[in-house]
C-alpha cells in the first residue's frame, strides 16, 4: 500500500510516477467548465408589438425613451465594444426585474447576458433612481407652501366633500424573505415577514412622502408619530387649516382627520354623513397601493432581497416610477370631477376640524345632499353608464336650479 506520492510502506509494492499523476488528476483535477457564449437580444426587435412590450416592462417604448433621457447622465456605457450594454437595455433589464420579480438568471437568459450582469445593472439603475434630484422631482410634499396646499385641496374638493385636505395617509405591508439578522422584528400580524410602508397620496393617486424604514412589527400610528411629516404638522410649520385624512387606526389630531367610531355614527346622522365623505376621499390611498403592487410584481410577491435594498426599491424604483408613469401617461391617475364638489371653510384656531365640518354639513343639508349626488353621478359617468352628453348637461342645469 502506498500514499499518493508513491512512497511505499513495508511489505507493499511501490508505484511509478505515472500512476501518481493519474491518481492526482483523478482526485484533484476537475474538468474545466465550457465557456458560455451569450447572444444579445434586442427587446425592440423581439417585442415589436406595443401591447406585449407594455406588459413586459410596464412602460411603452416612447416612455422608455423618456426614462433614458432622464437617467442618461447617471448611467454609463461600460465594458468592451462587443459586450457593451446600452443605457436603454439597462433600463429595460431593471424594469423587467421589478415587473416580474423573477430570478436574475431567467432575466439574464431573456436578454442574452449572465446573471452577474443583471445584478450589476439592477444596482446601477437603482442607484441612479435614488439620485436626490430625481427623488425631489417626483416626491414633492410642501405643506408649508400655501400655493401647493391650495392646489392639493382643490383636487380633493373635486373628489369628495372636503376642501381642506391635502393628502390621504395609510400603511402598506411589503412581503420579504425573513432576514438572517433580527428576522423576528419583521414578523407582522399577517403571519409573514414584511416591511411596513407609510405613505401619503394626493387626490390623483400620486405618492408624496413615504417611510419604509420600519419592520412589520411596528404599527402605523407609531411609525407616523416618529415621522418628519408628523413633526411638521404638530409643530405648526404647515399652513393652518390644511390637514390629512386617515382611517380609524390613526388618532384624530391636528395633523390627521379620522372617521367617527361606528357607534357614534349610528347614533348621529351628521357624523355618518361626515364618514361617507371622508371615506370617499380616503379610498384613493388604498387604490394607489393596489395599483402600485399590481404594476410592480416585486412588491406584490415575496421579495428575495435584504431589507436595505428593498427600501431602495420601494422608494426609488417603484414609487418614483409610478409617479413618472402618471406624469407621462403610462399609468392612469384617479379621475376627478370637472367641478368642485364642496367649498367648506377652514375651522377656526382651537376648534376640532372634524367637529367643525360635521356642524357645517348640518347647517347646509341640501348642499351636502347635492355633493353626495354629484359624486354618485360622476362615478356613473366614469363607469360608462352615462347615456349622453345632453343628459349630463340637463343634470347640471337641475343641480344649478336646486342650489
Image (cartoon, grey):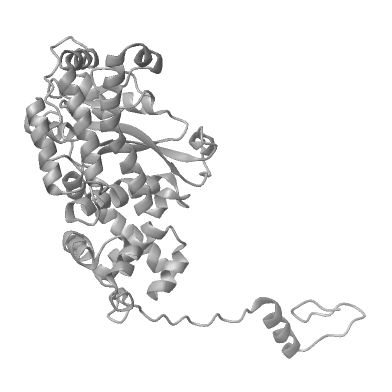
Q: Farthest residue toward the top?
A: 350
Q: Position of residue 184 (x, y in %)?
A: 54, 35
Residue 50 in percent (x, y) is at 27, 70
Give percent across and percent down for residue 149: 12, 31
Res. 175 in view: yes
Above or below 116: residue 224: above
Q: Residue furthest right?
A: 11
Residue at 33 percent across and 17 percent down: it is: 260
Q: Is residue 128 left or right of residue 343?
A: right
Residue 70 picture quarter: bottom left
How far from the left and from the top, in percent, is residue 64? 23, 64
Image quadrant containing the N terminus: bottom right
Seen in the picture, residue 100 relative to 25 is either above or below; the reply is above
Q: Residue at 73% across / 88% down in the picture?
A: 17
- Judged left or right of residue 172, residue 201 is left
In the foreground, 398 or 267: 398
Work out whether residue 202 can be spotted.
no
Q: Residue shown at 15%/34% (left/top)? A: 152
Q: Residue 227 lies in what quarter of the image?
A: top left
Residue drawn 29% across the image and 59% down it: 125
Viewport quadrant of the C terminus: top left
Depth check, front residue: 374 or 300: 374
Q: Quadrant of residue 261?
A: top left
Amino acid at each position: 500500500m502506498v500514499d499518493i506520492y508513491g512512497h511505499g510502506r513495508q511489505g507493499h509494492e511501490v508505484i511509478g510516477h505515472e500512476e501518481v499523476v493519474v491518481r492526482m488528476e483523478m482526485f484533484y483535477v476537475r474538468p474545466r467548465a465550457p465557456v458560455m457564449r451569450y447572444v444579445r437580444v434586442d427587446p425592440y426587435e423581439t417585442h415589436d408589438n406595443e401591447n406585449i412590450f407594455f406588459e413586459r416592462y410596464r412602460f411603452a417604448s416612447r416612455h422608455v425613451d423618456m426614462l433614458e433621457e432622464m437617467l442618461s447622465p447617471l448611467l454609463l456605457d461600460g465594458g468592451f465594444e462587443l459586450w457593451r450594454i446600452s443605457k436603454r437595455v439597462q433600463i429595460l433589464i431593471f424594469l423587467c426585474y421589478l415587473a416580474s420579480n423573477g430570478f436574475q438568471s431567467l432575466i439574464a437568459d431573456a436578454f442574452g447576458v449572465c446573471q452577474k450582469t443583471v445584478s450589476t445593472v439592477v444596482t446601477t439603475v437603482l442607484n441612479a433612481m435614488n439620485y436626490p434630484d430625481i427623488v425631489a422631482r417626483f416626491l414633492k410634499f410642501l405643506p408649508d407652501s400655501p400655493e401647493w396646499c391650495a392646489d392639493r385641496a382643490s383636487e380633493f374638493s373635486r373628489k369628495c366633500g372636503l376642501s381642506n385636505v391635502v393628502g390621504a395617509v395609510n400603511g402598506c405591508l411589503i412581503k420579504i424573505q425573513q432576514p438572517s439578522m433580527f428576522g423576528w422584528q419583521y414578523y407582522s400580524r399577517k403571519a409573514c415577514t414584511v416591511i411596513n410602508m407609510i405613505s401619503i397620496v394626493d387626490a390623483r393617486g400620486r405618492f408624496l412622502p413615504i417611510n419604509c424604514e420600519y419592520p412589520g412589527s411596528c404599527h402605523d400610528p407609531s411609525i407616523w408619530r416618529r415621522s418628519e411629516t408628523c413633526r411638521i404638522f404638530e409643530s405648526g410649520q404647515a399652513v393652518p387649516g390644511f390637514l390629512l385624512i386617515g382611517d380609524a387606526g390613526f388618532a384624530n389630531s391636528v395633523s390627521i382627520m379620522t372617521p367617527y367610531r361606528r357607534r357614534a355614527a349610528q347614533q348621529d346622522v351628521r357624523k355618518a354623513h361626515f364618514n361617507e365623505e371622508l371615506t370617499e376621499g380616503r379610498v384613493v390611498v388604498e387604490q394607489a397601493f393596489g395599483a402600485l403592487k399590481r404594476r410592480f410584481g416585486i412588491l406584490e410577491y415575496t421579495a428575495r432581497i435584504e431589507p436595505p435594498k428593498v427600501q431602495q426599491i420601494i422608494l426609488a424604483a417603484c414609487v418614483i416610477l409610478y409617479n413618472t408613469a402618471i406624469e407621462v401617461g403610462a399609468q392612469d391617475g384617479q379621475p376627478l370631477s370637472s367641478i368642485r364638489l364642496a367649498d367648506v371653510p377652514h375651522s377656526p384656531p382651537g376648534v376640532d376640524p372634524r367637529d367643525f365640518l360635521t356642524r357645517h354639513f348640518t347647517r347646509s343639508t341640501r348642499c351636502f345632499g347635492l355633493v353626495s349626488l354629484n359624486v354618485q353621478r360622476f362615478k356613473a359617468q366614469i363607469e360608462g353608464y352615462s347615456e349622453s352628453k345632453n343628459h349630463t348637461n340637463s343634470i347640471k342645469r337641475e343641480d344649478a336650479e336646486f342650489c
